[in-house]
Image (cartoon, grey):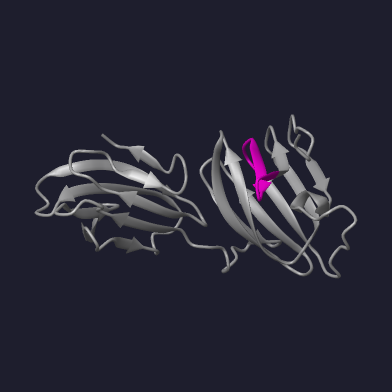
Amino acid sequence: MPLVPALRRASVVRVPALALGLLVGAALPARAGTVRIETEVPIEVTMKGMPVAKSYAAGTVTLDEVEPGEHELQVWREGKPAPVLVPVPEEGVVRLLVGADSLSVADAAGAALADAPAPRLSIQAPEAGQRFFLLIDGAPAGAVLAGSPLELATLGPGPHAVEVRSEDRLTVWARGVVELQPGDALVMKLHHGRMPEVFGRAGAWRDGR
């Protein structure tokens, strides 16, 4: 059973520290922060497999008395999870902003936090002898062959167009869009004559053919 009542319309709900997995009867930390989840879409939020918040509509959920430090949360939208690391301050508020296709962490004033994890994408060719050339957002990104993956850590969150070509760039093997979110660590595996396989988060890849 979710710890937060169903939100039928925009509203504000406050949840005690128990929602983040603190044991009943355990002493609360001397200092504790607040996580304010502001969502534009229906979501469920879990931590270590346990539900901590749920909303059936746009609204705000506030998690009070959260132990300071980084907490990895899973934000579920339409049954698809997206991980995010939330750095909780010793005092004050950290905001988790959830949109239909976006996920970000900000301070109380709305400034993006530098500690929010950048997405990472590793593009690999697991079969010996197969070589590829990648274009990302229309620009050359590099070659991929067995044992030499293409490691991308600077693309940033959001949708990115991917075109997989043969090594000589004459044959287009696949086109599509990879949706990167903060905290992503995705692996894309390439094969001749097949669409890429993306591991790390369900729904991150959309076929463009």
In the visual, does 149 lie left or right of 159? left
Image quarter of the N terminus: top right
Q: How many marks?
A: 0
Image quarter of the C terminus: top left
Could you say which is closer to the camera, residue 80 or residue 136?
80
Q: Position of residue 104 (x, y in %)?
A: 57, 55
Q: Position of residue 92 (x, y in %)?
A: 78, 65
Compared with residue 53, is residue 143 higher up or lower down, i.e. above or below? below
In the visual, does 189 lie left or right of 179? left
Could you say which is closer to the camera, residue 130 or residue 82?
130
User: Does residue 83 show up magenta in the picture?
Assistant: no
Residue depicted at 24% across the width and 57% down the height: 139
Return the residue found at the far top. Answer: 8
Compared with residue 186, is residue 39 higher up or lower down, i.e. above or below? above
Return the residue found at the far front. Answer: 128
Residue depicted at 35% across the width and 62% down the height: 152
Q: Position of residue 94 (x, y in %)?
A: 70, 60
In the visual, does 182 lie left or right of 31? left
Residue depicted at 57% across the width and 63% down the height: 116
Residues shaded magenta: 39-50
Q: Position of residue 99 (x, y in %)?
A: 57, 44
In the picture, residue 206 is in which quadrant?
A: top left
In the visual, does 21 lie left or right of 153? right
In the picture, residue 175 is in which quadrant?
A: top left
